[in-house]
Amino acid sequence: MTAIAPTLQAFFTERLIKQRNVSPRTIASYRDTLRLLFCFVQDTTGRAPSQLDWSELDEPVIAAFLAHLEQDRHNGPRTRNLRLTAIRSLYRYAALRHPEHAAVIQRVLAIPTARFDRPQVTFLTHIECQALIDAPDVSRWEGRRDRALLTLTIQAGLRVSEVIAITCADVTLDTGANVRVHGKGRKDRAVPLTGTSQRVLAVWTAERAGNPTDPLFPTRTGRRLSRDAVERLVQIHTAAARQSCRTLHGRRVHPHVLRHSCAMSLLHAGVDSSVIALWLGHADIRSTQPYIHADMTIKERALALVTPTNIKPGRYKPADEVLAYLESLG
């Protein structure tokens, strides 16, 4: 067994878990990336992962692995960059433990991220959101659950992981009604609830009647909904909403579109982008900028302020001092 195995184990147990205290989701992401890497190297070289040394995981090998992700596994640039982030994290840790391989490690760390086109943010209008909320069949238990879930997701701008993690105790419907959210990066925030959301959630929580630690939106068996289940219910209710809202035809609606819709509704209402960042749980206010680019109403208001092209250009000339004084007497 070479030096890679103990360093790899220490990377997870010491660096990620003890020192950085990262989330289980991050652990799983890094684990999957390195497993893919070692399987790729074993398939292409015949060398077992326990027999590899750092000199055999140099920049050409890592570059070939990234190309394999894009060409053979058909991963997009975002996924490719995410895998590279995990590899970089391991190599930065290895640099402290294996200075003899500093040159190899530095060449790997110098591999750049892939650039990609950023599509414009898609969102639903108020009418489309309402059609989606009204789509579930409230005569069924699942329909009443889904209506409450969609209402809260759109109004609070929640991520899928946040929605499925909400417990019954996280919702406060008394004075200062709000929902407490455990967000990305282990950042907690409280989002106020509108009157409409309060009424919908009051009906649902009374029917749910769960314990404080129970999921607010469970399955029939009481377990938490999965990400796939939320994705599926959004697709089902979008298909039903198309019957009453023609603008939804041809639109691909996924759970994150509901989060975008919340941000755009706040932006249209004149809410400052820094407040929107706090509302959505963004770590950086720059994450809110794509919503501004997607808002045509802001651009139209800016266009209205521009001087019309049919105005004859000229220079400003101050009024005569005597005439200005006489004008001021009026």
Image: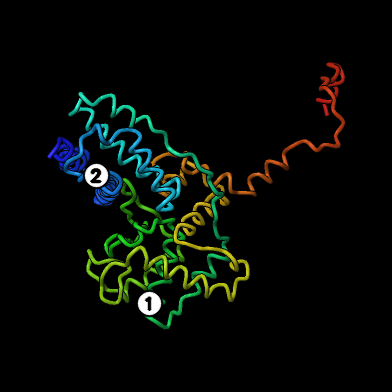
Tag 2: Cα neighbours inside 10 Å, few (<14), some, or many (≥20)?
A: some
Tell me residue 68's x, y (percent).
39, 47
Tell me residue 222's x, y (percent).
25, 73
Q: Which mark is residue 142?
A: 1
Q: Residue at x 57, y 72 (%)?
A: 242
**Relative to 326, does residue 43 appear above or below in the rendering?**
below
Name the secondary structure under disc 2: loop
Quarter holding the N terminus? top left
Tag 1: Cα neighbours inside 10 Å, few (<14), some, or many (≥20)?
A: some
- Image quadrant in which you'd find residue 193: bottom left
Q: Residue at x 30, y 33 (%)?
A: 58
Tell me residue 221's x, y (percent).
26, 76
**Relative to 94, does residue 300 appear above or below in the rendering?**
below
Which of discs 1 and 2 lies nearer the camera? The answer is: 2
Q: Amino acid at mark 1?
A: Glu
Q: Residue furthest bottom?
A: 139
Q: Amino acid at mark 2?
A: Val
Tell me residue 283's x, y (percent).
39, 41
- Could you tell which of marks 1 and 2 lies nearer the N-terminus? 2
- Which residue is more in the foreground, 322 or 246? 246
Residue under pointer 2? 22
Name the secondary structure under disc 1: helix
Q: Is residue 227 left or right of residue 303?
A: left
Quarter holding the C terminus? top right
Q: Residue at x 72, y 39 (%)?
A: 305
Q: How many tags in the picture? A: 2
Distance of mark 1 from mark 2, alpha carbons? 34 Å
Q: Do residues under tags 1 and 2 come within 8 Å of each other at their CB atoms?
A: no
